[in-house]
Amino acid sequence: MSTSIHTTAGDPPGGPDAERTGEALRAERDEFRRLLALGAEVTGAFARTQTLQAALQEGAQSVVDHVGAAFARIWTLDSAGTTLLLEASAGLYTHLDGPHGRVPVGQFKIGLIAEERRAHLTNHVLGDPRVGDQAWAAREGLVAFAGYPLLAGDRLLGVVALFARHALDETTLRALEVVSQTVAAAVARARDQDSLVRSEARLTAVLAGITEGVVVTDEAGQVTFLNKAAGALLGDQASAARGLPHHRVLTFLDEASGQPADSPLTAALLGGPIEGPRTPLLLRRPDGHVVPVELHAAPLRNESGGLTGVVLVLRDATESRRAERAAAELLRVQEAARAELALERQRLYSFLMQAPAGICVLRGPEHIFELANQLYLQLVGGRAIVGLPIRQALPELEGQGIYELLDRVRSSGEPFVGKEILLRVDRLGTGALDEGYFSFIYQPMRELDGRIDAILVHVLEVTEQVVGRKKLELAVAEAQRLGAEQHEVAERTRALLDEVSTQAREMEEAVRAMQQRLGEAEQRAAQGRVDGTTPG
C-alpha cells in the first residue's frame, strides 16, 4: 500500500540513534504487545461476531482502546461503487447518521483516500489542507490523522480512519496498516459470502422451479442436491438420495437393448467432454420403474479449474418419445402419400402428353416449365422451353397480362378460365409475332400439405373458330341490313299503291258524280222537248 506521511520535528519516527535505557526498552515491548493485542482483538471480532457491522464496530472500538485515538471510523463502499457508507464509529463520536454518514468517492479527505486508493497519514492535522474544519480540529485538540483504503487485491471495499490527540509513531502506523488489511480481508470475505449465499439462494430457487430434473454431486460423486423435478423422476426414493453415490441413485439402460449403460456422470467426474449420450437412455428408478430420459452432464469447476462436482440435467422423455414415434409414423404415411402422389402425377403427365390440347405444367414462383406436350410446343414454335421460367421461355408475353394471371392463381389458389383471349405469340420461334385467339384454363395444383407449387395449363387455339364466327356475324349483319332495306322498299311500295288506289277511288267517285249530273241534265232536256219548251 502506498502511503504519504507528514511528520513534525521531534516525532518518534527517525529520532536520534541513542543508547536505550531499560525503561525505554520495556516501554517499547509494552507498545509492541499492545499493538499485537490490537491485531488479535480485531481479528477475533470478525471471527466471533455474527454480523459484519457488529464486527466493524468492535474493530473501531479496539483501535480507539489500543491506540488511544480520539475516535475511529470505518466506511464500506456501496454496491454502485460511488458512495462510502459509515458502518462503525467509536470514541468521541458514535453516531452513524451525521454529515459523514454518506461520503461520495472523491470528496472530503475520506472520499479522496478511496478515489486515490492511497493512505493519508499526518501528525499535523492543523495545517493539513485535507482537514477542512481547522477550528473544529483545534477545539478538539486533534494532532494526528491516519486513513487507509480497504483493498482486497484490486477491489476497493471502503476506508478506515482515525483522529488522535497525540502523534502516531511509525510502529503504530504499521500496526494500523495491518489492521486495515485485516478489516479489508474480513469485509471481502463477508461480501463474498453474502454474494455466494444470495447466488446459491437464487440458484436453488431457479433449479427448484424449472421443469427439468437437476442432480448435483460433489467431486466424489455423492448426490448433494436434487430439485423437485428430479425427485418426481426418482419417485419415493428421492428423499433418501442425498449423500448416496450417484450410481446407487441413477441407473441408466440403453433404450434399444435394455442393457446397462455408462452413466454420463461418470464421464463428467473424470473431466470428460460436456455432451449428451450418443444413444437414447432409460432411467431405472430404485423402485424398478423405467423412464425414458433426455439428459446432459457437465463437470463443475472452481476458479482454479479444480473439479468440485457434476451437474446432471435430465427430463422425462416419455411424451417426447411418444411424439417422436407419432412423428415417425406421420412421416412414414407422408412419404407413402408422396410416393403415391408422385406415381399418380406420373400417370397424369403420361396422359397429358397425349391429350388433344396444349398442356403444360408450371412449377414454383417463377413458373418454370416442368412439362409441355407436343401440341403446346407447336403453339410456341417448337422452342426448347422445358426447365425455363416462363418469362425467359416466352418473353413475348410481357405486357399481355399472362405473367400476372399466373402469379394471381398461385397466390389465391383460385383457377382462371380465359375464353377467346387475343394474344401475340412467336409461332415459328423467329421473333416475329402473330396474333391469335386462345381459350385456356390455369388450374392450381396442391401438394399434400395444401401448398400450391404448380399450375396446370390447358390451352386451345380457337383462331379459326373466332375468325369464322366473326365473318358469319358480319354476313348475318349484312343480310339483316339488306332485309331491312327490302322491308323499307316494300313498305314504301305498299304506301304508294295505297295512295294510287285511293286516288283511283276518288276519280271513280268523281266520274260517277259527273255521270250522274249529266244524266240528270239529259233528263231535264228530254222533259223540255216534251213540254214544247227549251231549257233556259
Image (cartoon, rainbow, N blue to C red):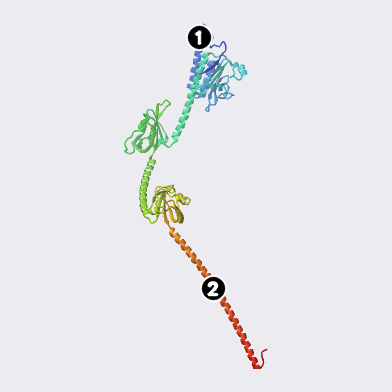
Looking at the image, tell me whether mark 2 or mark 1 is earlier in sequence order.
1
> Where does residue 431 sit, x and y in percent of width and height?
44, 51
Q: Is residue 63 above or below residue 192?
A: above
Give the mark count.
Answer: 2
Examine the rendering and report whether any part of residue 235 can be seen.
no
In this picture, residue 128 sits left or right of residue 154: right
State the mark number for residue 323.
none
Q: Is residue 139 above or below residue 359?
A: above
* Residue on which the image places disc 2: 493
The amino acid beneath tag 2 is Thr
The amino acid beneath tag 1 is Arg
Examine the rendering and report whether any part of residue 331 can be seen.
yes
> Where does residue 410 sit, x and y in percent of width and height?
44, 49
Q: What is the quadrant of residue 311 in the picture?
A: top left
Q: Nearer the viewer, residue 326 or 390?
A: 390
Q: Nearer the viewer, mark 2 or mark 1?
A: 2
Q: Quadrant of the C terminus?
A: bottom right
Alpha-carbon distance for marks 2 and 1?
A: 168 Å
* Residue on which the image places disc 1: 26
Q: Is residue 203 above or below residue 451?
A: above
Label 2 neighbour load within 10 Å: few <14, some 14-19, many 20+: few
Label 1 neighbour load within 10 Å: few <14, some 14-19, many 20+: few
- Under circle 1, the secondary element is helix
> Where does residue 321 sit, x and y in percent of width and height?
37, 41
- Under circle 2, the secondary element is helix
> Where does residue 167 sit, x and y in percent of width and height?
56, 14
